[in-house]
Image: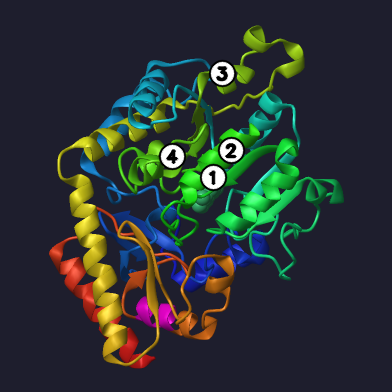
Amino acid sequence: MHPIASQQRWIDRARRVLPGGGFGNFDPGIVIREGRGAHVWDEDGREYIDYLIGSGPMLLGHGHPEVMEAILGQLPKGMTFFASNAAGIELAEAICEAVACAEQVRYVSSGGEADMYAIRLARAFTGRIKILKFEGGYHGMSAEAQMSLAPTRLANFPEAVPDSAGIPESVRAEMLIAPFNDVEFLQSLLAERGEEVAAIIVEPLQRIVPPEPGFLQALRDLADRYGVVLIFDEIVTGFRLAYGGAQEAYGVTPDLCTLGKIIGGGFPLAAIAGRADIMAHFDKAAVGADKWLMQLGTLSGNPVAAVAGLKTMEVLRRPGQYDRLTAIGARLMASASNALSARGIAHQVVGAPSLFEVVFTETRVRDYRAVLHADADRQSAFNRALRAGGLLKSPGKTYPCLALSEADLTATEAAYARAAERL
Ligand SMILES: Cc1ncc(COP(=O)(O)O)c(C=O)c1O
Protein backbone atom coordinates (compact mmCIF):
# COMPACT_ATOMS: atom_id res chain seq x y z
CA MET A 1 0.00 0.00 0.00
CA HIS A 2 2.82 2.39 0.89
CA PRO A 3 5.39 3.19 -1.76
CA ILE A 4 8.78 1.69 -0.99
CA ALA A 5 10.37 4.29 1.22
CA SER A 6 13.75 4.50 2.81
CA GLN A 7 13.95 4.86 6.53
CA GLN A 8 14.82 8.54 6.21
CA ARG A 9 11.59 9.22 4.37
CA TRP A 10 9.61 7.66 7.19
CA ILE A 11 11.57 9.66 9.73
CA ASP A 12 10.76 12.85 7.81
CA ARG A 13 7.09 11.96 7.59
CA ALA A 14 7.02 11.16 11.28
CA ARG A 15 8.53 14.55 12.14
CA ARG A 16 5.57 16.29 10.58
CA VAL A 17 2.85 14.42 12.40
CA LEU A 18 4.41 13.16 15.64
CA PRO A 19 5.76 15.40 18.42
CA GLY A 20 9.48 14.79 18.67
CA GLY A 21 9.22 12.79 15.47
CA GLY A 22 8.27 9.56 17.22
CA PHE A 23 5.99 7.80 19.65
CA GLY A 24 7.83 9.14 22.69
CA ASN A 25 9.17 5.72 23.58
CA PHE A 26 12.37 5.13 21.70
CA ASP A 27 14.93 6.63 19.35
CA PRO A 28 12.87 8.13 16.49
CA GLY A 29 15.90 7.68 14.24
CA ILE A 30 15.00 4.07 13.60
CA VAL A 31 11.76 2.82 12.06
CA ILE A 32 11.10 -0.88 12.41
CA ARG A 33 9.69 -2.66 9.40
CA GLU A 34 9.29 -6.13 10.82
CA GLY A 35 10.32 -8.60 13.44
CA ARG A 36 10.81 -12.37 13.24
CA GLY A 37 12.10 -14.49 16.06
CA ALA A 38 14.96 -12.66 17.75
CA HIS A 39 15.51 -10.33 14.78
CA VAL A 40 14.07 -7.06 13.56
CA TRP A 41 14.64 -5.14 10.34
CA ASP A 42 14.51 -1.39 9.90
CA GLU A 43 12.95 0.39 6.93
CA ASP A 44 16.29 0.33 5.14
CA GLY A 45 16.31 -3.45 5.48
CA ARG A 46 19.11 -3.40 8.08
CA GLU A 47 18.89 -6.41 10.36
CA TYR A 48 19.36 -6.34 14.12
CA ILE A 49 19.41 -8.92 16.86
CA ASP A 50 16.59 -7.68 19.04
CA TYR A 51 17.32 -7.07 22.72
CA LEU A 52 14.52 -4.51 22.95
CA ILE A 53 11.79 -7.08 22.23
CA GLY A 54 9.05 -4.47 22.31
CA SER A 55 10.32 -3.32 25.73
CA GLY A 56 9.75 -6.75 27.20
CA PRO A 57 6.61 -8.47 25.93
CA MET A 58 8.15 -10.59 23.17
CA LEU A 59 9.92 -13.06 25.44
CA LEU A 60 9.28 -15.86 22.92
CA GLY A 61 10.51 -13.69 20.05
CA HIS A 62 8.48 -12.08 17.27
CA GLY A 63 5.85 -14.10 15.46
CA HIS A 64 6.13 -17.26 17.55
CA PRO A 65 4.26 -19.82 15.42
CA GLU A 66 2.00 -21.13 18.19
CA VAL A 67 1.13 -17.64 19.41
CA MET A 68 0.39 -16.61 15.83
CA GLU A 69 -1.87 -19.62 15.40
CA ALA A 70 -3.80 -18.74 18.55
CA ILE A 71 -4.22 -15.14 17.41
CA LEU A 72 -5.26 -16.12 13.90
CA GLY A 73 -7.75 -18.57 15.41
CA GLN A 74 -9.34 -15.80 17.45
CA LEU A 75 -9.46 -13.04 14.81
CA PRO A 76 -12.39 -14.39 12.75
CA LYS A 77 -14.36 -14.94 15.98
CA GLY A 78 -14.11 -11.30 17.00
CA MET A 79 -11.54 -8.73 17.99
CA THR A 80 -13.13 -7.08 20.96
CA PHE A 81 -16.41 -7.39 22.84
CA PHE A 82 -16.29 -5.18 25.95
CA ALA A 83 -18.19 -8.06 27.54
CA SER A 84 -16.70 -11.02 29.42
CA ASN A 85 -15.24 -13.68 27.14
CA ALA A 86 -13.81 -17.15 27.67
CA ALA A 87 -10.23 -16.25 26.71
CA GLY A 88 -10.12 -13.45 29.27
CA ILE A 89 -11.56 -15.68 31.96
CA GLU A 90 -9.06 -18.44 31.20
CA LEU A 91 -6.20 -15.97 31.28
CA ALA A 92 -7.31 -14.75 34.72
CA GLU A 93 -7.38 -18.38 35.91
CA ALA A 94 -3.87 -18.95 34.54
CA ILE A 95 -2.60 -15.81 36.27
CA CYS A 96 -4.17 -16.87 39.58
CA GLU A 97 -2.53 -20.26 39.24
CA ALA A 98 0.89 -18.80 38.44
CA VAL A 99 1.21 -15.78 40.68
CA ALA A 100 1.32 -16.25 44.45
CA CYS A 101 -0.56 -13.07 45.46
CA ALA A 102 -3.20 -13.39 42.74
CA GLU A 103 -6.58 -14.48 44.05
CA GLN A 104 -8.42 -12.24 41.60
CA VAL A 105 -7.57 -10.24 38.52
CA ARG A 106 -8.83 -6.98 36.97
CA TYR A 107 -7.81 -6.17 33.39
CA VAL A 108 -6.72 -2.88 31.91
CA SER A 109 -4.88 -2.10 28.67
CA SER A 110 -1.48 -0.87 29.83
CA GLY A 111 0.95 -1.33 32.67
CA GLY A 112 0.73 2.32 33.65
CA GLU A 113 -3.02 2.03 34.06
CA ALA A 114 -2.59 -1.09 36.17
CA ASP A 115 -0.24 0.79 38.49
CA MET A 116 -2.52 3.79 38.67
CA TYR A 117 -5.47 1.61 39.70
CA ALA A 118 -3.39 -0.45 42.11
CA ILE A 119 -2.48 2.75 43.92
CA ARG A 120 -6.11 3.90 43.94
CA LEU A 121 -7.22 0.48 45.10
CA ALA A 122 -4.84 0.59 48.06
CA ARG A 123 -6.27 3.98 48.97
CA ALA A 124 -9.83 2.69 48.69
CA PHE A 125 -8.98 -0.34 50.83
CA THR A 126 -7.07 1.45 53.59
CA GLY A 127 -8.87 4.79 53.57
CA ARG A 128 -5.39 6.40 53.63
CA ILE A 129 -3.84 8.66 51.01
CA LYS A 130 -0.04 8.64 51.14
CA ILE A 131 1.92 6.46 48.74
CA LEU A 132 5.48 5.39 49.29
CA LYS A 133 7.51 4.84 46.14
CA PHE A 134 11.19 4.47 45.47
CA GLU A 135 13.39 6.98 43.73
CA GLY A 136 13.98 5.78 40.18
CA GLY A 137 11.09 3.31 40.35
CA TYR A 138 9.01 3.20 37.15
CA HIS A 139 5.29 2.71 37.45
CA GLY A 140 3.90 4.21 34.27
CA MET A 141 2.76 7.75 33.66
CA SER A 142 0.12 8.56 36.28
CA ALA A 143 0.67 11.69 38.35
CA GLU A 144 1.81 9.59 41.31
CA ALA A 145 4.16 7.51 39.21
CA GLN A 146 5.72 10.64 37.74
CA MET A 147 7.28 11.48 41.08
CA SER A 148 11.02 11.00 41.45
CA LEU A 149 11.27 8.57 38.57
CA ALA A 150 14.15 10.48 37.01
CA PRO A 151 14.30 13.55 39.25
CA THR A 152 16.00 16.63 37.83
CA ARG A 153 17.29 17.42 41.31
CA LEU A 154 18.18 15.05 44.07
CA ALA A 155 15.94 16.08 46.95
CA ASN A 156 16.22 14.94 50.53
CA PHE A 157 14.16 11.82 51.11
CA PRO A 158 11.19 11.51 51.45
CA GLU A 159 10.51 14.67 49.40
CA ALA A 160 9.06 13.93 45.96
CA VAL A 161 10.19 15.70 42.80
CA PRO A 162 7.79 15.72 39.84
CA ASP A 163 9.25 14.46 36.56
CA SER A 164 6.61 15.99 34.38
CA ALA A 165 4.88 19.29 33.80
CA GLY A 166 1.16 19.45 34.40
CA ILE A 167 0.97 17.66 37.75
CA PRO A 168 -0.76 19.46 40.60
CA GLU A 169 1.30 20.19 43.70
CA SER A 170 -1.31 18.33 45.74
CA VAL A 171 -0.13 15.03 44.25
CA ARG A 172 3.48 15.70 45.17
CA ALA A 173 2.43 16.39 48.72
CA GLU A 174 0.89 12.93 49.05
CA MET A 175 4.00 11.04 47.92
CA LEU A 176 6.84 9.76 50.06
CA ILE A 177 10.04 8.84 48.25
CA ALA A 178 12.63 6.43 49.60
CA PRO A 179 15.95 5.09 48.36
CA PHE A 180 15.74 1.52 47.04
CA ASN A 181 17.42 -1.13 49.18
CA ASP A 182 17.59 1.09 52.28
CA VAL A 183 15.75 -0.77 55.04
CA GLU A 184 16.88 1.54 57.82
CA PHE A 185 15.46 4.59 56.10
CA LEU A 186 12.13 2.83 55.61
CA GLN A 187 11.99 1.70 59.18
CA SER A 188 12.37 5.22 60.49
CA LEU A 189 10.06 6.74 57.86
CA LEU A 190 7.28 4.29 58.60
CA ALA A 191 7.78 4.55 62.36
CA GLU A 192 6.89 8.21 61.89
CA ARG A 193 4.36 8.15 59.05
CA GLY A 194 3.30 4.50 58.74
CA GLU A 195 -0.30 5.12 59.79
CA GLU A 196 -0.78 7.59 56.91
CA VAL A 197 0.54 5.30 54.20
CA ALA A 198 -1.89 3.44 51.93
CA ALA A 199 0.66 1.59 49.82
CA ILE A 200 4.27 0.84 49.21
CA ILE A 201 4.73 0.38 45.48
CA VAL A 202 7.97 -1.17 44.33
CA GLU A 203 9.56 -2.76 41.32
CA PRO A 204 10.97 -5.86 43.04
CA LEU A 205 13.91 -5.61 40.67
CA GLN A 206 14.06 -1.86 40.19
CA ARG A 207 14.76 -1.17 36.50
CA ILE A 208 17.92 -3.34 36.57
CA VAL A 209 18.86 -3.09 40.24
CA PRO A 210 18.19 -6.29 42.18
CA PRO A 211 16.84 -6.19 45.71
CA GLU A 212 19.49 -6.91 48.33
CA PRO A 213 18.85 -10.03 50.39
CA GLY A 214 16.15 -9.27 52.94
CA PHE A 215 14.99 -6.00 51.38
CA LEU A 216 11.68 -7.28 49.97
CA GLN A 217 11.00 -9.25 53.14
CA ALA A 218 11.61 -6.07 55.15
CA LEU A 219 9.00 -4.32 52.98
CA ARG A 220 6.60 -7.20 53.65
CA ASP A 221 7.20 -6.98 57.41
CA LEU A 222 6.85 -3.20 57.52
CA ALA A 223 3.68 -3.29 55.42
CA ASP A 224 2.21 -5.83 57.84
CA ARG A 225 3.25 -3.85 60.89
CA TYR A 226 1.68 -0.60 59.70
CA GLY A 227 -1.31 -1.98 57.79
CA VAL A 228 0.06 -0.79 54.46
CA VAL A 229 -0.77 -2.50 51.14
CA LEU A 230 2.38 -3.86 49.52
CA ILE A 231 2.26 -3.59 45.73
CA PHE A 232 4.84 -5.30 43.54
CA ASP A 233 4.98 -3.76 40.10
CA GLU A 234 5.61 -6.92 38.11
CA ILE A 235 4.91 -5.40 34.69
CA VAL A 236 8.48 -6.29 33.74
CA THR A 237 9.36 -9.07 36.17
CA GLY A 238 6.11 -11.04 35.82
CA PHE A 239 6.64 -14.28 33.87
CA ARG A 240 10.23 -13.14 33.25
CA LEU A 241 12.26 -13.61 36.43
CA ALA A 242 10.35 -16.85 36.90
CA TYR A 243 6.98 -18.15 35.73
CA GLY A 244 5.54 -16.81 39.00
CA GLY A 245 7.44 -13.54 38.62
CA ALA A 246 9.63 -11.78 41.16
CA GLN A 247 7.43 -12.97 43.99
CA GLU A 248 8.37 -16.53 43.11
CA ALA A 249 12.01 -15.68 42.35
CA TYR A 250 12.55 -13.78 45.61
CA GLY A 251 10.08 -15.68 47.78
CA VAL A 252 8.11 -12.66 49.05
CA THR A 253 4.39 -12.34 48.38
CA PRO A 254 2.89 -8.85 48.09
CA ASP A 255 -0.78 -7.96 48.66
CA LEU A 256 -1.24 -6.76 45.09
CA CYS A 257 0.81 -6.91 41.96
CA THR A 258 0.54 -5.40 38.53
CA LEU A 259 1.21 -7.43 35.41
CA GLY A 260 1.55 -6.44 31.77
CA LYS A 261 3.88 -6.97 28.83
CA ILE A 262 4.23 -10.79 28.62
CA ILE A 263 0.63 -11.56 29.69
CA GLY A 264 -0.68 -9.76 26.60
CA GLY A 265 1.61 -11.65 24.20
CA GLY A 266 2.45 -8.40 22.39
CA PHE A 267 -1.05 -6.90 22.55
CA PRO A 268 -2.36 -4.18 24.87
CA LEU A 269 -3.33 -6.00 28.03
CA ALA A 270 -2.31 -5.55 31.64
CA ALA A 271 -3.78 -6.44 35.00
CA ILE A 272 -4.01 -5.77 38.69
CA ALA A 273 -3.95 -9.00 40.66
CA GLY A 274 -4.08 -9.69 44.35
CA ARG A 275 -5.87 -10.51 47.55
CA ALA A 276 -9.59 -11.03 47.12
CA ASP A 277 -10.51 -8.78 50.06
CA ILE A 278 -8.66 -5.88 48.44
CA MET A 279 -9.82 -6.68 44.91
CA ALA A 280 -13.37 -6.65 46.29
CA HIS A 281 -13.23 -2.85 46.05
CA PHE A 282 -13.71 -3.21 42.30
CA ASP A 283 -17.10 -4.74 43.11
CA LYS A 284 -19.73 -2.22 44.16
CA ALA A 285 -22.07 -4.95 45.39
CA ALA A 286 -19.36 -6.28 47.70
CA VAL A 287 -18.18 -3.05 49.32
CA GLY A 288 -20.93 -0.49 48.75
CA ALA A 289 -20.86 2.74 46.76
CA ASP A 290 -18.60 4.63 49.20
CA LYS A 291 -15.73 2.20 49.04
CA TRP A 292 -16.15 1.16 45.45
CA LEU A 293 -13.41 1.87 42.94
CA MET A 294 -15.06 2.58 39.62
CA GLN A 295 -12.99 1.10 36.83
CA LEU A 296 -13.75 0.12 33.26
CA GLY A 297 -12.04 0.23 29.89
CA THR A 298 -13.08 -0.38 26.30
CA LEU A 299 -10.41 -2.97 25.57
CA SER A 300 -10.21 -4.62 29.02
CA GLY A 301 -9.93 -8.40 28.71
CA ASN A 302 -9.53 -8.14 24.95
CA PRO A 303 -9.83 -11.68 23.56
CA VAL A 304 -7.04 -11.36 20.97
CA ALA A 305 -4.63 -10.16 23.63
CA ALA A 306 -5.89 -12.85 26.01
CA VAL A 307 -5.29 -15.75 23.60
CA ALA A 308 -1.86 -14.34 22.74
CA GLY A 309 -1.02 -14.10 26.44
CA LEU A 310 -2.43 -17.53 27.25
CA LYS A 311 -0.44 -19.22 24.51
CA THR A 312 2.72 -17.34 25.50
CA MET A 313 2.25 -18.53 29.08
CA GLU A 314 1.58 -22.09 27.93
CA VAL A 315 4.87 -22.11 26.04
CA LEU A 316 6.68 -20.61 29.03
CA ARG A 317 5.35 -23.36 31.32
CA ARG A 318 7.10 -26.05 29.31
CA PRO A 319 10.07 -27.66 31.06
CA GLY A 320 13.40 -25.95 30.64
CA GLN A 321 12.26 -22.56 29.36
CA TYR A 322 13.44 -20.52 32.33
CA ASP A 323 16.64 -22.58 32.62
CA ARG A 324 17.36 -21.75 29.01
CA LEU A 325 16.56 -18.05 29.47
CA THR A 326 18.85 -17.97 32.50
CA ALA A 327 21.64 -19.74 30.62
CA ILE A 328 21.35 -17.33 27.67
CA GLY A 329 21.29 -14.26 29.90
CA ALA A 330 24.12 -15.44 32.14
CA ARG A 331 26.26 -16.14 29.09
CA LEU A 332 25.58 -12.67 27.66
CA MET A 333 26.25 -10.98 31.00
CA ALA A 334 29.56 -12.80 31.28
CA SER A 335 30.58 -12.03 27.69
CA ALA A 336 29.82 -8.33 28.05
CA SER A 337 31.80 -8.24 31.25
CA ASN A 338 34.74 -10.20 29.85
CA ALA A 339 34.90 -7.98 26.77
CA LEU A 340 35.06 -4.84 28.91
CA SER A 341 37.48 -6.33 31.45
CA ALA A 342 39.80 -7.36 28.64
CA ARG A 343 40.07 -3.65 27.75
CA GLY A 344 40.45 -2.58 31.36
CA ILE A 345 37.15 -0.67 31.35
CA ALA A 346 35.54 -0.21 34.78
CA HIS A 347 31.99 -1.53 34.71
CA GLN A 348 29.44 -3.79 36.34
CA VAL A 349 26.81 -5.95 34.72
CA VAL A 350 23.76 -5.36 36.87
CA GLY A 351 20.45 -7.20 37.00
CA ALA A 352 19.29 -10.75 36.45
CA PRO A 353 20.01 -13.02 33.47
CA SER A 354 16.56 -12.32 32.03
CA LEU A 355 17.08 -8.55 32.26
CA PHE A 356 20.39 -6.78 32.76
CA GLU A 357 22.54 -3.87 31.77
CA VAL A 358 26.17 -2.85 31.72
CA VAL A 359 26.73 0.09 34.06
CA PHE A 360 29.98 2.01 33.83
CA THR A 361 30.80 2.55 37.46
CA GLU A 362 32.90 1.07 40.22
CA THR A 363 30.42 2.01 42.95
CA ARG A 364 28.13 -0.79 44.08
CA VAL A 365 24.82 -0.38 42.24
CA ARG A 366 22.10 -0.66 44.85
CA ASP A 367 19.83 2.27 44.03
CA TYR A 368 18.91 4.94 41.49
CA ARG A 369 21.66 7.34 42.51
CA ALA A 370 24.36 4.75 41.92
CA VAL A 371 23.11 4.30 38.34
CA LEU A 372 22.86 8.07 37.93
CA HIS A 373 26.49 8.55 38.95
CA ALA A 374 27.75 6.05 36.40
CA ASP A 375 29.54 7.25 33.28
CA ALA A 376 26.64 8.20 31.00
CA ASP A 377 28.83 9.23 28.07
CA ARG A 378 30.51 5.87 28.09
CA GLN A 379 27.11 4.20 28.32
CA SER A 380 25.92 6.10 25.24
CA ALA A 381 29.10 5.32 23.33
CA PHE A 382 28.76 1.64 24.22
CA ASN A 383 25.12 1.62 23.12
CA ARG A 384 25.98 3.36 19.85
CA ALA A 385 28.70 0.82 19.18
CA LEU A 386 26.32 -2.05 19.89
CA ARG A 387 23.75 -0.56 17.51
CA ALA A 388 26.45 -0.23 14.85
CA GLY A 389 27.35 -3.83 15.58
CA GLY A 390 23.80 -4.97 14.84
CA LEU A 391 22.12 -5.09 18.25
CA LEU A 392 18.89 -3.26 19.00
CA LYS A 393 18.43 -2.47 22.67
CA SER A 394 17.02 0.15 24.96
CA PRO A 395 19.49 2.71 26.34
CA GLY A 396 19.22 1.24 29.84
CA LYS A 397 18.25 -2.39 29.53
CA THR A 398 19.09 -5.59 27.72
CA TYR A 399 16.24 -8.05 27.33
CA PRO A 400 17.30 -11.53 26.16
CA CYS A 401 14.56 -13.63 24.56
CA LEU A 402 14.00 -17.33 24.01
CA ALA A 403 14.25 -17.05 20.23
CA LEU A 404 17.98 -16.28 20.37
CA SER A 405 20.00 -18.90 18.50
CA GLU A 406 23.58 -19.98 19.02
CA ALA A 407 24.52 -17.88 15.99
CA ASP A 408 22.78 -14.84 17.56
CA LEU A 409 24.66 -15.33 20.80
CA THR A 410 27.99 -15.66 19.01
CA ALA A 411 27.24 -12.54 16.95
CA THR A 412 26.29 -10.69 20.14
CA GLU A 413 29.53 -11.69 21.80
CA ALA A 414 31.45 -10.39 18.80
CA ALA A 415 29.47 -7.13 18.98
CA TYR A 416 30.34 -6.77 22.68
CA ALA A 417 34.02 -7.33 21.91
CA ARG A 418 34.00 -4.74 19.10
CA ALA A 419 32.11 -2.22 21.21
CA ALA A 420 34.56 -2.65 24.10
CA GLU A 421 37.41 -2.13 21.66
CA ARG A 422 35.83 1.09 20.36
CA LEU A 423 35.48 2.49 23.87
C1 LIG B 1 8.03 -1.60 35.93
C2 LIG B 1 7.07 -0.98 34.95
N1 LIG B 1 5.87 -0.60 35.39
C3 LIG B 1 4.97 -0.06 34.56
C4 LIG B 1 5.24 0.14 33.25
C5 LIG B 1 4.23 0.78 32.36
O1 LIG B 1 3.71 -0.12 31.46
P1 LIG B 1 3.04 0.39 30.10
O2 LIG B 1 4.17 0.96 29.29
O3 LIG B 1 2.42 -0.82 29.53
O4 LIG B 1 2.05 1.43 30.48
C6 LIG B 1 6.48 -0.22 32.74
C7 LIG B 1 6.80 -0.01 31.33
O5 LIG B 1 7.87 -0.31 30.85
C8 LIG B 1 7.43 -0.77 33.62
O6 LIG B 1 8.65 -1.10 33.20
Residue shown at 54% from the left, 29% from the top: 299
- Does residue 248 appear in the picture of this structure? yes
Residue shown at 69% from the left, 27% from the top: 126
Could you tell me which secondary element the residue under label 1 belongs to?
A: helix
Q: Which of the marked residues, 4 or 3, is nearer the chain's N terminus?
A: 4
Labels in figure, total: 4
Confirm or deny contact between disc 1 and disc 2 (CB under 8 A). yes
- Does residue 146 appear in the picture of this structure? no
Give the Cα separation between the discs numbered 4 and 3: 29 Å
Name the residue type under label 3: Asp
Give the Cα separation between the discs numbered 2 and 4: 33 Å
Q: Which residue is mark 4?
A: 267
Q: Which residue is mark 1?
A: 219
Confirm or deny contact between disc 4 and disc 3 (CB under 8 A). no
Name the residue type under label 1: Leu
| Region rendered in magenta | 382-388
Confirm or deny contact between disc 3 and disc 1 (CB under 8 A). no
Name the residue type under label 4: Phe
Residue shown at 65% from the left, 37% from the top: 119
Judging depth in this view, the residue of 158 and 148 nearest the camera is: 158
Q: Which of the marked residues, 2 or 3, is nearer the chain's N terminus?
A: 2
Could you tell me which secondary element the residue under label 3 belongs to?
A: helix
Q: Is residue 121 magenta?
A: no
Dominant SS in magenta: helix
Judging depth in this view, the residue of 159 and 396 nearest the camera is: 159
| Dot in front, 3 or 1 | 1
Q: Position of residue 311 (x, y in %)?
A: 28, 33
Q: Position of residue 217 (x, y in %)?
A: 47, 44
Left or right of residue 334, residue 141 in this image = right
| Dot in front, 2 or 4 | 2
